[in-house]
Amino acid sequence: PLRGKHDERSLVFADLTREEYSQVQQYMLKQKDLDISTNQITKPSENFLFLIDLSLPKKADTLAYLDDGKGKPTREATAVVFYGKSGYVKEYVVGPLPNPKYHRDVTKERYNTDIPINSRPVTIGEYAVLFEFLEAEFFSKLQKLMKESFDVDDTKHLNAFEQMPRGVRSGDRSTWISFMRDMSGMYIHPVGLEVLVNHESVNSSQWTIQRVLYNGQYFDSVQALKEKYDRGSVKKILYTKSRDYGSLKPKTKPLQVGPQLFHPEGKRYSISDNHVLYMDWSFAFGLSSLTGMRVFDVRFKDERILYELSVQEAMSVYGSVTPGMGLTKFFDTSIGIGRFAHQLVRGVDCPYEAAYITTYRYIDAPNPIKFEDSICIFEHNLGQPLRRHFSDFFHNSYGGMVNSALVMRTITAIGNYDYMWDFIFYQSGSVEAKVHATGYISSSYMMEGSLNYGHQVAEKVLGNLHTHFINFKVDLDVAGVKNVFQTKDMKFVNTSVPWQPGHHAMIPQLVEEQLNTEQEAALRYNTKTPRYLHVASPKVNRWGHPRSYRLQVFTFAGDHLPESEPEERSMSWARYKVAITKQKDLEQTSSSLYNQNNIWSPTVDFSKYIDDNESIVDQDLVAWVTAGFLHIPHAEDIPNTVTVGNGGGVLLRPHNYFDEDPSIHSADGVYINPS
Amino acid sequence: PLRGKHDERSLVFADLTREEYSQVQQYMLKQKDLDISTNQITKPSENFLFLIDLSLPKKADTLAYLDDGKGKPTREATAVVFYGKSGYVKEYVVGPLPNPKYHRDVTKERYNTDIPINSRPVTIGEYAVLFEFLEAEFFSKLQKLMKESFDVDDTKHLNAFEQMPRGVRSGDRSTWISFMRDMSGMYIHPVGLEVLVNHESVNSSQWTIQRVLYNGQYFDSVQALKEKYDRGSVKKILYTKSRDYGSLKPKTKPLQVGPQLFHPEGKRYSISDNHVLYMDWSFAFGLSSLTGMRVFDVRFKDERILYELSVQEAMSVYGSVTPGMGLTKFFDTSIGIGRFAHQLVRGVDCPYEAAYITTYRYIDAPNPIKFEDSICIFEHNLGQPLRRHFSDFFHNSYGGMVNSALVMRTITAIGNYDYMWDFIFYQSGSVEAKVHATGYISSSYMMEGSLNYGHQVAEKVLGNLHTHFINFKVDLDVAGVKNVFQTKDMKFVNTSVPWQPGHHAMIPQLVEEQLNTEQEAALRYNTKTPRYLHVASPKVNRWGHPRSYRLQVFTFAGDHLPESEPEERSMSWARYKVAITKQKDLEQTSSSLYNQNNIWSPTVDFSKYIDDNESIVDQDLVAWVTAGFLHIPHAEDIPNTVTVGNGGGVLLRPHNYFDEDPSIHSADGVYINPS
Ligand SMILES: [Ca+2]
Ligand SMILES: [Ca+2]
Ligand SMILES: [Ca+2]
Ligand SMILES: [Ca+2]
Ligand SMILES: [Cu+2]
Ligand SMILES: [Cu+2]
């Protein structure tokens, strides 16, 4: 029952194709003066083409194209180059595709600052050098200890799990690396060995090992550890084999397949390029290497509701007595959320019958990489009514409708954690953005004081307490781009009861407010927030009420890092459950590729978007929503955290947007009248 | 893959059978001195056998039977008699079944008070008299007005929608009745006519009409309205036909059936009598006419986790400028939640393939009534992984498992609202209790000041603002009955960083606390609550941590009625998000059949359970959990509220209860290793 038609104009939001990535790559390589390499193991001291991704056209141009028949915006790419030779990072806009003719340095325009080279993430090229360095300067110098404590020799090794940020002040690039057993689920097999490597210089010859932690004891150098170990003045770890508790191999044979979804009359949605039709819905989708899944131009019955709904950042702050995890603050966008959207497993990650979509990315790679089945789209029967009523007074009848909704999903496995991202489109006109966490927790080797930071979850293993904060960008356009931000709530008012003279009662009343500036509308997590939050239009529905969408945030967030901390500005979006800004093309994201590694001087500090405290009355508004949960790991996180209860998100609900529930027009409605 | 065996001992929790209801009824009728009628339209002035329901055996006796091989507890029923002739209500325990030999008045034992007759709900017998009264004293005296304003004549009538509580002080039984068009979804068709009927006396000859509200104008008598109306000094309502916006008839023809669930290899659960087996789970279930759905003796891998999980109450407080809804506070248990668990519609209310269970009830009826298909049980594929991890560093592998869970559901349609109640049993050892609201909102006719209390949702119709508060009883027995109540949370602590001399940082730490008394553990809604709440055992898991279940409450509750209000004690459970009491057989429920109609002197005031502030250390604990949401009705509530976003509940999660995630032993696990 497709109500709409596919629209090629959705391609304006489409990710770059394999060919387009290559076109940009070839164009950049032709700029001999830039002296760029695309070799995967380019050294930090050289210039490396790290990333090519779609450069989104300006919103005004895109709306003119979509709504007013204006010309198609120029298709452009963003190219990110790490200039190891010069000590900085540059971002270029390259265009027009498919035949690039220009590149423009947009670094200053986008970030108002230069980007020092140490703001970059660690590339595969740098890891290669790092692992060589560790072999030469660390493992090979501690062979006796390594064998006795960890059974490491020429054939067996430990795996590295690195912590971020890399230091304590701007310019630092000193990384604590924890070593893990080379077993499946290494993240929950710490061995009690951690090392602080200074790799600040792009020349690895200047790298040093600054500190070592072994079995709870600190050493200023590898040499100091070796000498004391050999002398016997060190509390030793004696190797013992470990249970394979991190394994995900089933311990029971499959017996009987569980319930499955099927489509007795075929699929009820359609996908053409990056355009999706489902019942009254249509939207375009994409997958940014950095920020992950996103949809654009989301319409219901042909009317645009969202210009953009996108994942922005997934951040965690850890606690630990150990240096690995002690200061850890992970920003997944700086590693690349979409980058790790791998192939989905049919029947587990998504239903067998889902549509699976192949994507291409160009990030930290010599060529565009194909990711088969990295997005799934399916209609799900939620196993419950969307609405129903049974009447046994006066009129005996039944009306109802099952809740079938369209789900778009990616799952991104960034190191230990797997985040499942869902956008759900309901027949009642609601859209939901949800995230669930699964995969492995991070852990540390037990030492004195460990239990202040979590629970023991395996032999000598502490599951470290941490927060999960997730940021979504919600660019609602409610009946046009000019909107206001409204709140609604209740209050009890002492009221004289007209039909009961002399009697007073506390009666709940509606409280409505309009928040007029960005700072008023920045709703902090630790304050009481009105229960209903609305992006509303000055236009009214049939009953005279402003047409609006309500933002209902599902969250169990822990505490946000105090603002006194120098790392806080890099994650200042997490101060707010919901913050509203005036839309700007240059405020495209709440975080950046560089926020992790220059956490102390962030290229994007979200709080600056609202520092100018602009009016948000009758403006194009963007809501930035933060959901999350506090995670105190427990034995049941072994081997993997389960999705049940470990999630959050935001539901966007029509509230006087329509004149009645649009699902009453669904063909799925059922009506029974016994008379 | 059934792991356990059915256990007949679950019958100790089973609802009375049709035969048992009849045995109790016949026994009671034989007690000639009680002078009881079972006629459905027994007058208020007579004695009426209102309710027969299971009387739960004492917990200690039941545990002795289940765990220690002691004898089966005597099977007994509760019988509730409304003594119109004497002016009180009595509750009896009748036993032993199947051949009752005794009845014992337990009113005082259960409630510490007598129950005055006006505490009773309005029976079908009383409604019959009430409608006759309205016809004679109201409609027949206003024929001209009725025709002109509402098109009411000999063939056409209005429907009544009554408000509660019935008055403003103890002993009152004066009910505001709002009149609605005789159309489907009458709840959203108010006509602007309301009448206050005093039916305090059991003799209807003494009933009076105390006030009338017509088109926003109050009148002290029917006569006064009639005279002023005839004189033309009243602002009149002129009848116009109304759109059929309350109809649930589909407006679109079915086109293509949506996705369905099927079991390619058969069902993976088993139901025998009231005993259910599913994977590692087993439990007994029942359906109380008053409180609704409940499960007992819930075990995972043969170990009891819950003695009881049950619905207790669904309460709403409304706001309105009109008398109908102005003071309205609905308590559904006083009407009977389980009473309205009607037949479920296959494919909408539950999947086609679900198991449907027939129940019997005896409430306000001359005989036990059969309710076909009033409970459904099914395994649902939630369309997402319960857990998964994809590894691309060091080890390339994938392990995961789809989230298939068992759902037990009833849907209770109490007047306008339909509540969908779900208990969900996950393979990770979690149990969830959830409720969603759907059906019709309550509404009022627009008059001056209406918009302070909600939004207009149809012509002249206000959707009135209200709260939904739902109470669950959660009698966890964590590794035995002796438990403690623990909280966990995080705090940032300024910490000197050992590996970075002179450097301090705010690092999150774990904060654990044990709450030792009932009052400490009564966690009010308007205060900051620790993020993790645990019922814990003194026994520890393999890693030395107390075995516990965590209570994670999903709620969007509005404000609770201020305690200054005389009606508040009747709903004092709603003060608390979670309250913990020492288990007592005489503290079986948080509300009662009588709380609605004697709201000012409640037979059960939950706050009294914690007034004695008993120790909750190493005691048998019961958690009382309140979830809910604030409902500000909007156009999309017409015709029906949708379930999406309109719900709440509690997730019970193992937290160091096991030594690892039990789902790792599920036969549903999938593992892929490309090497
Ligand atoms: Ca601004
Ligand atoms: Ca907008
Ligand atoms: Ca007590
Ligand atoms: Ca207990
Ligand atoms: Cu976590
Ligand atoms: Cu409601």
Image (tube, coloured by chain):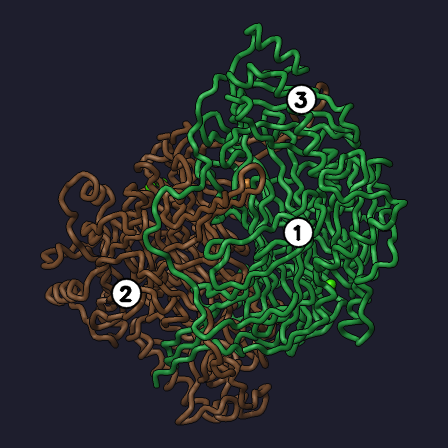
Chain colours: A green, B brown
Badge 3: residue crowd in 10 Å (few <14, some 14–19, many ≥20): few
Badge 1: residue crowd in 10 Å (few <14, some 14–19, many ≥20): some
The residue positioned 56% from the left and 92% from the top of the image is: B231
Q: Please tell me in which quadrant of the rendered image residue B125 appears.
A: bottom left
Parent chain of label 2: B
Question: Residue beneath label 1, please?
Answer: A369
Identify the element where label 1 is drawn. Answer: strand
Disc 3/disc 1 C-alpha distance (Å): 32 Å
Identify residue type, mark 1: Ile
On the image, the x and y values in percent for residue A525 come to 64, 46
Q: Which mark is residue B357?
A: 2
Q: Is residue A58 visible?
A: no
- Please determine whether, in this image, residue A536 is positioned above or below residue B192: above
Left or right: B135 as drawn, with respect to A341: left
Disc 2/disc 3 C-alpha distance (Å): 70 Å
Please report contact status of discs 2 and 1: CB closer than 8 Å, yes or no.
no
The label nearer to you, 2 versus 3, is 3
Badge 2: residue crowd in 10 Å (few <14, some 14–19, many ≥20): some
On the image, the x and y values in percent for residue A160 come to 60, 30
Q: Is residue B273 visible?
A: yes
Question: Residue beneath label 3, please?
Answer: A136
- Please determine whether, in this image, residue A467 is positioned above or below residue B151: above
Mark 3 and mark 1 lie on one chain; the one further toward the N terminus is: 3
Identify the element where label 2 is drawn. Answer: strand
The residue positioned 41% from the left and 37% from the top of the image is: B660
Parent chain of label 1: A
Parent chain of label 3: A
